[in-house]
Amino acid sequence: MTSIPMNDLIATFGSKLHENVAMANFTTAQVGGPVPALISIQSLDDLIKASTFLWERTIPFIILGSGSNILVSDKGLDRIVLHNRAHNIMINTKSDPPSIKAESGAILGTVARQSALRGLSGMEWAAPVPGTVGGAVYGNAGAHGSDMAKSLRWQKSCTKLRE
């Protein structure tokens, strides 16, 4: 197993850190063994802080969204899990074209429903798709003749997360 500096993690993340967590509690299939620690992520800033901290210390980690479409070994994982619950959704119906900005932990079906409630079209295909925006982008989720690649627009400001 990789040596994970738990004391440093506890000092840095405090109550956001949960030790020796069974992944079965975080997957829709309800399977999966233990991980050394799970860090609760509630915002983009949390995600940047946690991933930067772990990356700089070469501590192995993965990012988990809603736990759909994944299976975790009953033996567990030798890495930290960042449980991504950054779920803010911002819908601008006044821009041309209208736009939706959603954090990676937002549930894709919720984004689709919220956009439809505001009279926007184009995300209807995503309403029944399980999982988060981050997972959908990563895997190019799709249904009913459309997919994430057709629903995304490149925004240059997205490439610069912090100064």
Image (cartoon, rainbow, N blue to C red):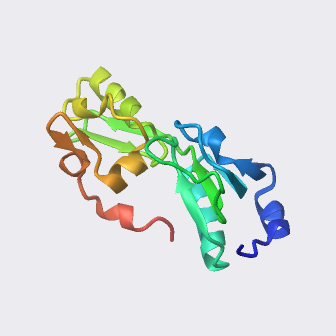
Quarter of the image with the N terminus is bottom right
| The image quarter in which residue 126 lies | top left
Residue drawn 31% across and 21% down? Answer: 117
Q: What residue is rendered at 85% in x and 67% in y?
A: 7
Horizontal relation, residue 37 to residue 145: left or right: right
Q: Is residue 20 left or right of residue 85?
A: right
From this viewpoint, is residue 96 visible?
A: no
**Vertically, is 78 above or below 97?**
below
Q: Is residue 145 left or right of residue 29?
A: left
Foreground pick, 120 / 15: 15
Q: Position of residue 36 (x, y in %)?
A: 74, 59
Query: Where is residue 63 shown, x and y percent of the image?
Result: 54, 56
Q: Position of residue 19 (x, y in %)?
A: 79, 53
Above or below: residue 78 compared with residue 128: below
Q: Nearer the viewer, residue 11 or 144?
A: 144
Most distant residue in the front direction: 74
Let me know if residue 101 appears in the view. yes
Q: Which residue sits at x=29%, y=58%? A: 155
Residue 81 occupies which quadrant of the picture?
Answer: bottom right
Where is residue 2? Give x, y as percent. Answer: 71, 75
Nearest the viewer among 110 and 34 is 34
| Placement of 155 over or under 135, stated as above or below | below
3 to 135, vertically: above or below: below
